[in-house]
Amino acid sequence: MIKQRLESIESFKKGNRQDLVDKEEKELLVLREFVPVQLSADEIAGDIEEAVAQLEARSPRTWER
């Protein structure tokens, strides 16, 4: 939904429809309040490394018990 709003804002700006830009921007603010913060690739990689270390995994099958 956020992506859709961003695309709409871009289109409305090109069409010189500030009234619709304003409406979409307000909706975008509301949507962003409910969407969790996305992790960066580095944060995800760090979480994976931490999990592997905690499990002492040496291969993909190590976690199976």
Image (cartoon, rainbow, N blue to C red):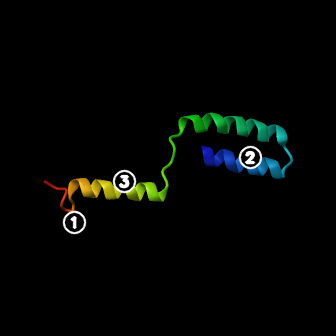
Which mark lies nearer to you, 3 or 2? 3
Q: Residues within 10 Å of mark 2 (few under 14, many from 20)?
A: many
At which x and y percent is residue 58? 21, 65
Q: How many marks?
A: 3
Residue type at numbered disc 1: Ser
Residue 47 in the figure: left or right of residue 64: right
Q: Is residue 16 above or below residue 45?
A: above
Q: Disc 1 marks which residue?
A: 59
Dot 3, how many residues are within 10 Å of its Cα: few (below 14), some (14-19), or many (20+)?
few
Residue occupying the point 50% across, 48% down: 38
Labelled disc at residue 47:
3
Q: Classify residue 42 as left or right of residue 47.
A: right
Residues marked 3 and 2 touching at CB (< 8 Å): no
The disc at residue 9 is: 2
Among the 4 quarters of the image, the one containing residue 30: top right
Which label lies toward us, 1 or 2? 1
Question: Which one is earlier in the sequence, the residue at label 3 or at label 2?
Answer: 2
